[in-house]
Amino acid sequence: MSELLSNFVAGRWQAGTGAGTPLFDPVTGDELVRVDATGLDLPAAFAFARDTGGAALRSMTYGQRAELLVRIGTVLQAHRDAYYALSLANSGTVKNDTAVDVDGAMYTLAQYAKWGAALGERRFLLDGEAAKLSKEPLFQSQHVQVPTQGLALFINAFNFPAWGLWEKAAPALLSGVPVVVKPATATAWLTQRMVRDVVDAGILPPGALSIVCGSSVGLLDALQPFDVLSFTGSADTAALIRRHAAVAERSVRSNIEADSLNSALLLPGEAPGSEAFELLVKEVAREMTVKSGQKCTAIRRVLVPAELFGAVAEAVSARLARTTVGNPRHESVRMGALVSRAQKVAVLEGLAMLKTQAEVLHDGTHTGLVDADPERSCCVAPTLLGVRDADAAGLVHDHEVFGPISTLVAYRDLPHALALARRGQGSLVASLYGSDAGTLACTALALAASHGRVHVVSPDVAATHTGHGNVMPQSLHGGPGRAGGGEELGGLKALNFYHRRAALQAGSAVLGALG
Ligand code: NAP
């Protein structure tokens, strides 16, 4: 039997008492390790995190906690090769895809360390200016933000086992809030290994970082009012979480990142061969293939003027045809596997569903795989679909297929394109491609209310823009409506989630003594 990975809770490594759930190599199908959380005393584990970890973290300044993030980054950097090997084995990723996850995690930690260092000796945050409450300015109201006195539970998705932990843990730990992470089972190995390395390095106080691998049973029941919960995953699980008593009755603050029908929009008037046209084509092909399309931010809908439908289809298809798919251990392979058999089944079913309303513009499913068995492996080559009558075909705006699948959608004019983008009912990101700064600015503002991020690609930023799907810690990550309504990252504003805001009403002498 394969190795059973341990959980780290209540300050010690504890193995589950069940048989365990196996994790697989999605290319070869080999069993790798098992995870199990049966028998853990979660209420006691959570109490230890709150009382021991939380108290120790809160006794430090923001500057001292920023230093902890620096040291975590150093440990992760030292083990980077091992993480690349684990990601290849358990997530089936090529090196470039692993970099998005692993190096993205380290970059985000480093950014928060830098921002935290600038907060220096502080132990709480002032929130705005004091406002006078009486005629004389003596009695005033000053809002403050103080670290919540609970824990942060992260229930994460399978697609970012490294970044998904650290993009949340960086602002939580910097805020002085202990972390309990429950990675998605399919790819939990990398998360568990990172936690193990950080625990072994003895950087964090006991109780500051815990990991539960395996079933989520009992996790939400153990939450208390001052805890916070950050969930990334499907809309169905998100709905269950919203209804759970911890959230519905105990007011546990929750942040939800769920499905998203992100779009890319080529503005009118950008002919084939123009820079904006070429930038869109390049970005669509890249977004479809990076991490085999398993990015919450990936472009699912490509909105183009009806008269350019054929030209875009041809150009994107030409790029996709050059993508070699298969075993990421092979030098020539540019795109690896989906993370699991369950995902392969879900993607192929979703593709079949979309095909009932769309034509196939580039069929990846018949492409030969390099060094991978089409039956045994979870490799799925990219497919570009097309919809010429966007108003009639509803599925493309409603059904997220979490793989290398995008749909080209024709629009009549810009108002029509905006209406189609909004049919995603709230998305993480839309990207715009054009050359007229005024039109791009108006379009970006018009989409801001229904998107967490609008990524504008004009020829002047062709070489420097950070990519439609790349989540940068400087920018908000989240989206309204069906994207979950969550907000993560976006600089120090992310700390608000881990703080409680309170108004202090007092005389100016007392407020002056706050420090
Ligand atoms: P999922 O089934 O909802 O799983 C997500 C996490 O929730 C996993 O850790 C899972 O554990 C756990 N979970 C499952 N059932 C639960 C329950 N009843 N109570 C508490 N936790 C539970 O989602 P998925 O299918 O693995 O993830 C893919 C989805 O995530 C995609 O639809 C994608 O849109 C979304 N996603 C969104 C973002 C974003 O930032 N917006 C990022 C990445 C992915 P197990 O793995 O043990 O079942």
Image (cartoon, grey):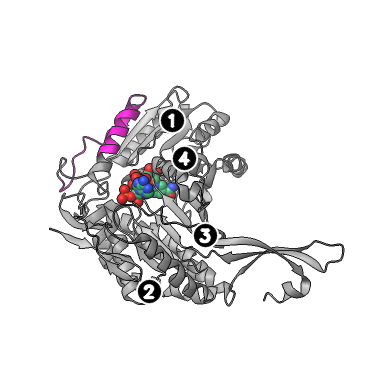
Type of the residue with mark 4: Ala
Q: Is residue 262 above or below residue 122?
A: above
Residue where numbered disc 2 is placed: 74
Q: Residue furthest left?
A: 1
Q: Earlier in the sequence, mark 2 or mark 4?
A: 2
For the point 78% across and 70% down, which residue is it? 507
Question: How many callouts does the rendering have?
Answer: 4
Q: Is residue 229 magenta?
A: no
Q: Position of residue 489 (x, y in %)?
A: 50, 57
Type of the residue with mark 3: Phe
Please report contact status of discs 4 and 1: CB closer than 8 Å, yes or no: no
Type of the residue with mark 1: Val
Callout 1 crowding tier (Cα within 10 Å): few <14, some 14–19, many ≥20: many
**Secondary structure at numbered mark 3:** loop
Would you identify the image quadrant in which residue 403 lies?
top left
Q: Which residues are magenta?
A: 345-372
Residue where numbered disc 4 is placed: 264
**Secondary structure at numbered mark 1:** strand
Q: Position of residue 415 (x, y in %)?
A: 58, 30
What's the mark number on residue 42? Answer: none
Q: Earlier in the sequence, mark 4 or mark 3?
A: 3
Callout 4 crowding tier (Cα within 10 Å): few <14, some 14–19, many ≥20: many
Disc 2 to disc 4, how far (Cα)?
37 Å
Placement of the N terminus among the 4 image quadrants? bottom left
Type of the residue with mark 2: Thr
Residue where numbered disc 1 is placed: 409
**Which label lies toward us, 2 or 4?**
2
Q: Nearer the viewer, residue 320 or 403?
A: 403
**Which label lies toward us, 4 or 3?**
3
Q: Earlier in the sequence, mark 2 or mark 1?
A: 2
Residue where numbered disc 3 is placed: 226
